[in-house]
Image (spheres, rainbow, N blue to C red):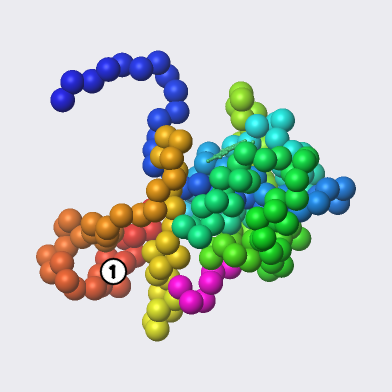
Amino acid sequence: MSKEVWKAGNMLYPLPVVMVSCESEEEKPNIITVAWAGTVCTNPPMVSISVRPERHSYAMIEKSKEFVINLTTKDLVKATDYCGVRSGRDVDKFKEMGLTLQESSKIKVRGIKESPVNIECKVREIIKLGSHDMFLADVMAIQIDSSLLNEKGKLELSKSKPIVYSHGEYYDLGNLLGTFGYSVKKDKGKKPAAKQRSKRQK
Ligand SMILES: Cc1cc2nc3c(=O)[nH]c(=O)nc-3n(C[C@H](O)[C@H](O)[C@H](O)COP(=O)(O)O)c2cc1C
């Protein structure tokens, strides 16, 4: 395999691409598409989103100190792209994309009903980085579409047809290749024992 050396840049792909909903007293509810989002801590559950200060959403999140990360799906791919190329300064993205506001359980800012998973977040810190500022946030609650739960109550997220963003392109997920820890499991067909399951905590 021969390689080229490129100058420093962003090349961590594929990534989740999420629709972040935000609200402030003065503005209409808005949605910003964000790919620079990540899980940063298991306990306490924490996430980050990085947003350019010039975005309309930036000031809204800065003021309310809250946002909702709404997971995206094949059905939401057009809305995901649209919310990333139009500004809430000019259009009502909820209206234009036929999306519905959904009350949150632990925060004031509302989520997107059509998204299968809504992660309610409270900003802990805003870290200035350069082009983007990072909103470091605590996860306060999660709402999950109950049709994604199997008879044992386990979340089957793949049923929602999640999408990923890879170097300017959106994809759905391909085939299931394995499950967490399968490479070291003796009986590959067997369910993980309770002890093994606890090891899944990252
Ligand atoms: C796939 C995709 C990913 C994006 N990721 C980010 C991001 O991580 N941070 C950011 O500030 N803008 C990101 N953008 C751009 C904003 O979503 C875009 O500028 C949007 O129009 C801002 O909306 P607003 O002005 O209503 O806040 C992304 C756009 C797309 C299409």
Q: Amino acid at mark 1?
A: Lys
Q: Nearer the viewer, residue 5 or 166?
A: 166
**Does 47 sit above or below residue 98?**
above
Q: Quadrant of the rendered structure where residue 190 is?
A: bottom left
Q: Residue 54, position in %: x, y?
A: 72, 30
Q: Which residues are magenta?
A: 140-148
Q: Residue 80, position in %: x, y?
A: 56, 49
Q: Nearer the viewer, residue 39 or 34?
A: 34
Residue at figure coordinates x 46%, y 36% from the top left: 168
The quadrant of the image that shows the N terminus is top left
Near mark 1 (Cα within 10 A), the count class, few <14, some 14-19 or many ≥20, is few
Residue at figure coordinates x 12%, y 65% from the top left: 186
Magenta-drawn stretch contains 22: no
Q: Quadrant of the rendered structure where residue 113 is?
A: bottom right
Task: List the single residue furthest toward the bottom.
Answer: 151
Q: Residue 69, position in %: x, y?
A: 59, 54
Q: Nearer the viewer, residue 109 or 173?
A: 173
Q: Nearer the viewer, residue 188 or 175?
A: 175
Residue at figure coordinates x 40%, y 16% from the top left: 7
Task: List the single residue furthest toward the left.
Answer: 186
- In this view of the protein, can residue 43 be seen by the observer? no
**Does 104 sit above or below residue 96?**
below
Name the side, left or right, on which 154 lies relative to 140.
left
Magenta-drawn stretch contains 141: yes
Name the side, left or right, on which 161 lies relative to 141.
left
Mark 1 lies on residue = 195
Q: Residue 123, position in %: x, y?
A: 68, 47
- Name the quadrant where ligand 1 sits: top right
Q: Quadrant of the rendered structure where residue 201 is?
A: bottom left
- In this view of the protein, can residue 99 be seen by the observer? yes
